[in-house]
Amino acid sequence: MARFTTGTLSENRAMLIATEVQDLGQEHRGWADEQLTLNPEDFAGESRKALGDRVRALVQEIEPVTALERIDDARSRRFLRLIPTGNMTMRLIGQNPAEHGVLMHQVLSDLADSKTAAGKGQGRTREQIRADEFCGLVTGEQNISPRVEIELVMTDRILFQAEAEPAYLQGYGTIPAAMARQLVRGRDMELKLMRWIRRTGALDLDPRPDLRDPGLPEPGAAH
């Protein structure tokens, strides 16, 4: 937290970092602080989500077992609850595994976009359409089977060598390597080979053809 003590890091961002590293040992917290201050320019214009992802990736790499224990605990407390809020409305709240949330978000977004594009919005906002479609799917009034996908980016080292380097779940953020391997294990999936452009930090699609249902995963992003 050296940058906070010098006044170059806001209190909110300092608290965000402190929350992410709170389960690390003292030695590891010091190491994480050093890593975060190696490149001060990284903080310039960085969003809170990007900062959180960056710190979380460090924690997951330093103590992967601790990170998995926290994730298992959070996932075990999944729930959905409907709470009356008056004026003939109810609020839906809950906590679900990240991959389920990403899929639900994609399905509802695709349905809302399709309705709007087909002129079937009937004056409803996109969020109203999402709410109506969600209700229809849960109650059985809608029966669809859209093609959905999870975009999970990981290195070949994560897949083949059981390294602790975190993966990235599109729509959520960084996740531990072990959790990424659990998500792709035994699933019908499509793999796309990617090339990491170290200079820009970007991912570029490999010119080789896509791999579908391979016997063994290839380095790249698992869908």
Image (cartoon, rainbow, N blue to C red):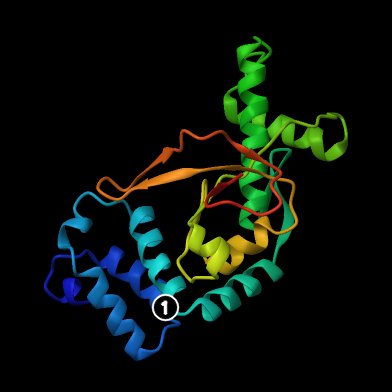
Please tell me whether mark 1 sits on a helix, a strand or a loop. helix
- Residue 81 position, x and y percent, is 73, 56
Q: Is residue 95 visible in the rendered structure shown here?
A: no
Asked if residue 113 is positioned above or below residue 25 in the image, the reply reads above
* Left or right of residue 6, residue 63 in this image: right
* Left or right of residue 144, residue 80 in this image: left
Residue type at mark 1 is Ile
Q: What residue lies at 64% left-to-right and 52% top-to-bottom?
A: 99
Q: Quadrant of the C terminus?
A: top right
- Residue 172 position, x and y percent, is 52, 52
Q: Is residue 5 visible in the rendered structure shown here?
A: yes
State which quadrant residue 216 falls in.
bottom right
User: Mark 1 Cα within 10 Å, few/some/many (few <14, many 20+)?
Assistant: some
| Residue extending furthest toward the bottom | 26
Q: What residue lies at 60% left-to-right and 65% top-to-bottom?
A: 179
Task: Report the front residue among 31 and 126.
Answer: 31
Question: For mark 1, what is the residue?
Answer: 62
